């Protein structure tokens, strides 16, 4: 196995223009064959103060890390996610800038955990593969050019919006989150997982043990709870911490509540959301929960908050082949 690259560091930049912008730069899947090396993760405490050439105004609470910014808003008001976003353990290949009410996520999309050396990949022209229409092939994952701006204060919409195909949120690992569905927008990835034989007669999975896989174009993403990501920030039997943020600004968590009890799908709303206490918001906050389930409750099915239309255009999916 190739050793991970440890050259990247988490960076905290505070700009001197009034109150400046804040920048944070910031599992293992098993396979019978060789695994692909991850990008290393760096603790949020490993920081360097630098100057920035593009200062923007930011609230004093966010700059100072005031704990009041993490408290839930009064009834009917929105909650500022700034402090929680600052404290998240972003991977070393992630750069985060928080300014002007926006959370900017820049990443190459390569997850900071191992991947399978091979995946079950769809044959040419197949949109939703199964064991009869897929072939074992070398991991096609390649670097992306993610640059997303997400609100730090999510606003609840009048009614939910269906989550689109492609990227619907970003994760602390540097990779993307997809909704539960495959390319036909109805086949649930977790319920249609399968294996094919490679040239050595080994079983090669469609989804890896992180509940993720690459698209044929090379975009690695998750369809469900990535335990290899939660294991980086959660203790066994303990509560889930923030592992990402959806495009509407609401945070994404694993499947444990503030007491470490497993959350079930019956506790979630139609979008996979719940209002409850978390380590970052002990008095309660609305957030999404990812589950390790073989059905559509595995990921975010709709957005509770308002979403910028530019973020819902099948980010990173590329041209889809016709259905077969």
Image (spheres, rainbow, N blue to C red):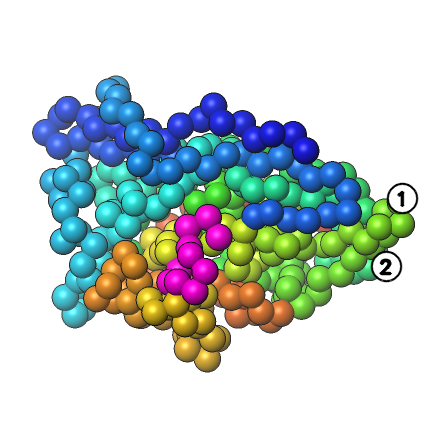
Point out which mark residue 170 bears. Answer: none
Image height of 207 relative to 40, above or below:
below
Query: Farthest residue toward the bottom?
Result: 266
Classed neighbour count for the residue bearing mark 1: other residues with Cα under 10 Å, few (<14), some (14–19), many (≥20): few
Is residue 156 rendered magenta in the image? no
Point out which mark residue 132 bears. Answer: 2
From the top left corner, tell me how far across and down residue 157 is, in percent.
32, 64
Nearest-to-viewer mark from 1 and 2: 1
The region drawn magenta spans 231-240
Locate the N terminus and report the quarter of the image it occupies. Answer: top right
Tell me the SS state at disc 2: loop
Nearest the eye: 148 or 244: 244
Q: Is residue 183 left or right of residue 149?
A: right
Classed neighbour count for the residue bearing mark 2: other residues with Cα under 10 Å, few (<14), some (14–19), many (≥20): few
Nearest the eye: 19 or 155: 19
Asked whether the viewer can see residue 180, the reply is yes
The residue shown at (31%, 36%) is: 45
The residue shown at (34%, 57%) is: 250
From the top left corner, tell me how far across and down residue 248 is, in percent.
36, 55
Nearest the eye: 220 or 50: 50
Is mark 1 in CB contact (under 8 Å) with mark 2?
no
Is residue 233 rendered magenta in the image? yes
- Classified by dominant secondary structure, the portion drawn in magenta counts as loop
Nearest the eye: 295 or 307: 295
Residue bearing mark 1: 199
Locate the C terminus and report the quarter of the image it occupies. Answer: bottom right
Asked whether the viewer can see residue 142, the reply is no
Tell me the SS state at disc 1: loop
Image height of 94 relative to 133, above or below:
above
From the top left corner, tell me how far across and down residue 267 is, in percent.
41, 77
Q: Earlier in the sequence, mark 1 or mark 2?
A: 2
């Amino acid at each position: 196995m190739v050793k991970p690259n440890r050259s990247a560091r988490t960076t905290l930049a505070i700009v001197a223009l009034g109150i400046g912008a804040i920048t944070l730069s910031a599992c293992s899947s098993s396979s019978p064959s060789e695994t692909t090396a991850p990008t290393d993760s760096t603790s949020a405490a490993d920081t360097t103060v630098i100057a920035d050439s593009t200062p923007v105004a930011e609230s004093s609470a966010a700059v100072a890390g005031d704990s009041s910014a993490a408290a839930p808003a009064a009834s009917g008001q929105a909650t500022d996610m700034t402090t929680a976003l600052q404290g998240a353990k972003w991977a070393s290949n992630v750069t985060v800038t928080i300014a002007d009410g926006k959370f900017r996520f820049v990443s190459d999309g390569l997850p900071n955990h191992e991947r399978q050396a091979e995946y079950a990949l769809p044959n040419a022209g197949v949109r939703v593969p199964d064991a009869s229409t897929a072939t074992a092939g070398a991991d096609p994952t390649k670097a992306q050019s993610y640059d997303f701006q997400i609100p730090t204060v999510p606003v609840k919409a009048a009614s939910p919006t269906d989550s689109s195909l492609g990227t619907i949120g970003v994760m602390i690992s540097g990779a993307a989150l997809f909704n539960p569905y495959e390319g036909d927008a109805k086949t649930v990835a977790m319920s249609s997982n399968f294996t094919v034989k490679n040239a050595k007669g080994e079983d090669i999975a469609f989804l890896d043990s992180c509940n993720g896989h690459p698209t044929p174009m090379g975009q690695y993403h998750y369809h469900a709870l990535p335990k290899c990501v939660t294991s980086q920030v959660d203790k066994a039997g303990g509560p889930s911490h923030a592992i990402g943020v959806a495009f509407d600004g609401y945070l994404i968590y694993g499947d444990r509540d503030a007491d470490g009890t497993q959350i079930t799908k019956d506790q979630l709303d139609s979008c996979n959301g719940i209002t409850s206490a978390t380590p970052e918001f002990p008095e309660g906050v609305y957030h999404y929960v990812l589950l390790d389930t073989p059905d559509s409750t595995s990921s975010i099915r709709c957005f509770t908050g308002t979403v910028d239309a530019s973020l819902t255009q099948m980010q990173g999916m590329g041209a889809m082949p016709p259905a077969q």
